[in-house]
Amino acid sequence: MTRVALIAALALALTACGGGSGASLHTLAKTRSCLLKNREVKLDRKLDFVASTATGGALHVKMPQNAATVVFGESVGDADNINEAYHRFRAKNVGIEDIIRQDKNTVILYRTHPSDEDLATIQNCLK
Protein backbone atom coordinates (compact mmCIF):
# COMPACT_ATOMS: atom_id res chain seq x y z
CA MET A 1 0.00 0.00 0.00
CA THR A 2 1.44 3.38 -0.92
CA ARG A 3 1.98 6.05 1.68
CA VAL A 4 -0.81 8.23 0.24
CA ALA A 5 -3.25 5.31 0.23
CA LEU A 6 -2.33 4.46 3.82
CA ILE A 7 -2.92 8.06 4.93
CA ALA A 8 -6.24 8.15 3.07
CA ALA A 9 -7.32 4.86 4.68
CA LEU A 10 -6.38 6.17 8.12
CA ALA A 11 -8.29 9.41 7.50
CA LEU A 12 -11.35 7.44 6.39
CA ALA A 13 -11.16 5.23 9.48
CA LEU A 14 -10.92 8.25 11.76
CA THR A 15 -13.84 9.92 10.00
CA ALA A 16 -15.95 6.80 10.48
CA CYS A 17 -15.35 7.08 14.21
CA GLY A 18 -17.17 10.42 14.18
CA GLY A 19 -14.96 12.09 16.74
CA GLY A 20 -16.37 10.03 19.58
CA SER A 21 -17.14 12.82 22.06
CA GLY A 22 -20.73 13.48 21.00
CA ALA A 23 -20.10 17.17 21.69
CA SER A 24 -21.62 19.72 19.32
CA LEU A 25 -19.32 20.56 16.45
CA HIS A 26 -18.66 23.89 14.78
CA THR A 27 -20.07 24.56 11.31
CA LEU A 28 -18.84 26.71 8.47
CA ALA A 29 -22.26 28.30 7.87
CA LYS A 30 -22.87 29.41 11.48
CA THR A 31 -19.30 30.60 11.94
CA ARG A 32 -19.32 32.54 8.66
CA SER A 33 -22.63 34.20 9.61
CA CYS A 34 -21.21 35.34 12.95
CA LEU A 35 -17.98 36.66 11.42
CA LEU A 36 -19.88 38.65 8.80
CA LYS A 37 -21.54 40.64 11.62
CA ASN A 38 -18.12 42.05 12.60
CA ARG A 39 -17.50 45.17 10.48
CA GLU A 40 -13.73 44.96 10.98
CA VAL A 41 -13.55 41.46 9.48
CA LYS A 42 -13.46 40.61 5.79
CA LEU A 43 -13.86 37.14 4.30
CA ASP A 44 -12.26 36.09 1.05
CA ARG A 45 -11.70 32.90 -0.94
CA LYS A 46 -7.93 32.72 -0.38
CA LEU A 47 -7.44 29.10 0.74
CA ASP A 48 -4.30 27.01 0.87
CA PHE A 49 -4.21 23.40 -0.33
CA VAL A 50 -4.99 21.86 3.08
CA ALA A 51 -7.96 24.16 3.63
CA SER A 52 -9.30 23.62 0.12
CA THR A 53 -9.58 19.87 0.77
CA ALA A 54 -11.28 20.08 4.19
CA THR A 55 -14.32 17.86 4.65
CA GLY A 56 -16.30 20.58 6.45
CA GLY A 57 -15.16 23.53 4.35
CA ALA A 58 -12.96 26.50 5.17
CA LEU A 59 -12.82 30.26 5.07
CA HIS A 60 -10.12 32.91 5.12
CA VAL A 61 -10.61 35.79 7.55
CA LYS A 62 -8.85 39.15 7.20
CA MET A 63 -8.70 41.08 10.48
CA PRO A 64 -7.25 44.59 10.98
CA GLN A 65 -3.83 43.31 12.13
CA ASN A 66 -3.79 39.64 11.10
CA ALA A 67 -5.44 36.98 8.97
CA ALA A 68 -6.54 33.43 9.67
CA THR A 69 -7.63 30.37 7.77
CA VAL A 70 -10.44 28.60 9.62
CA VAL A 71 -10.76 24.97 8.53
CA PHE A 72 -13.62 22.66 9.48
CA GLY A 73 -13.63 18.89 9.63
CA GLU A 74 -16.81 16.86 9.75
CA SER A 75 -15.44 15.31 12.96
CA VAL A 76 -12.75 15.87 15.55
CA GLY A 77 -10.76 13.14 13.80
CA ASP A 78 -10.89 15.14 10.57
CA ALA A 79 -9.59 18.21 12.43
CA ASP A 80 -6.78 16.13 13.93
CA ASN A 81 -5.79 15.12 10.39
CA ILE A 82 -5.97 18.74 9.20
CA ASN A 83 -3.78 19.84 12.11
CA GLU A 84 -1.29 17.08 11.28
CA ALA A 85 -1.27 18.12 7.61
CA TYR A 86 -0.42 21.72 8.54
CA HIS A 87 2.42 20.45 10.72
CA ARG A 88 3.70 18.20 7.95
CA PHE A 89 3.55 20.77 5.11
CA ARG A 90 4.75 23.84 7.04
CA ALA A 91 7.83 25.72 5.98
CA LYS A 92 10.78 24.63 8.08
CA ASN A 93 11.35 28.18 9.35
CA VAL A 94 7.75 28.57 10.62
CA GLY A 95 7.04 28.05 14.32
CA ILE A 96 3.70 26.40 13.65
CA GLU A 97 2.79 25.90 17.31
CA ASP A 98 2.69 29.67 17.70
CA ILE A 99 0.15 30.23 14.92
CA ILE A 100 -2.13 27.17 14.96
CA ARG A 101 -5.05 26.37 17.25
CA GLN A 102 -7.57 23.53 17.28
CA ASP A 103 -11.04 23.62 18.85
CA LYS A 104 -13.10 20.47 18.45
CA ASN A 105 -13.50 19.92 14.68
CA THR A 106 -11.96 23.27 13.72
CA VAL A 107 -8.34 24.21 13.02
CA ILE A 108 -7.36 27.87 12.89
CA LEU A 109 -4.10 28.86 11.21
CA TYR A 110 -3.10 32.49 11.80
CA ARG A 111 -0.76 34.39 9.47
CA THR A 112 1.24 35.75 12.42
CA HIS A 113 1.21 35.29 16.19
CA PRO A 114 -2.39 36.04 17.20
CA SER A 115 -3.15 38.81 19.68
CA ASP A 116 -5.82 38.27 22.32
CA GLU A 117 -8.17 40.28 20.08
CA ASP A 118 -7.42 38.03 17.08
CA LEU A 119 -8.08 34.93 19.18
CA ALA A 120 -11.36 36.35 20.53
CA THR A 121 -12.56 37.43 17.07
CA ILE A 122 -12.39 33.86 15.80
CA GLN A 123 -13.15 31.97 19.00
CA ASN A 124 -16.29 33.98 19.76
CA CYS A 125 -17.72 33.08 16.35
CA LEU A 126 -17.04 29.34 16.37
CA LYS A 127 -20.57 27.99 16.36
Image: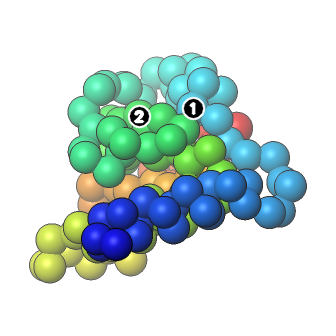
Number of marks present in the image shown: 2
Say the numbered circle drawn on residue 122: none
* Residue situated furthest right in the rendering: 22
Whether residue 102 is visible: no
Percent position of residue 68, x then y? 36, 47
Q: Which residue is mark 2?
A: 59
Q: Mark 1 falls on what kind of element?
A: helix
Amino acid type of the residue that numbered disc 1 sits on in the rendered structure? Leu
Contact? badges 2 and 1 (CB < 8 Å): yes
Q: Position of residue 4 (x, y in %)?
A: 30, 65
Q: Crowding near pointer 2: few (<14 within 10 Å), some, many (20+)? A: many
- Looking at the picture, which amino acid does disc 2 mark? Leu
First reached walking from the N terminus: tag 2 or tag 1: 1
15 relative to 6 in the view: left or right: right
Q: Report whether 122 appears left or right of 45.
A: right
Disc marking residue 28: 1
Q: Residue 63 versus residue 1: which sits nearer the camera?
A: 1
Instruction: Specify few, some or many for label 1: CA neighbours under 10 Å numbering under 14, 14-19, or 20 or more.
Output: some
What residue appears at the point 22 percent right and 69 percent down from the top-left corner?
90
Q: Relative to 82, is 71 above or below?
A: above
Q: Quadrant of the C terminus?
A: top right
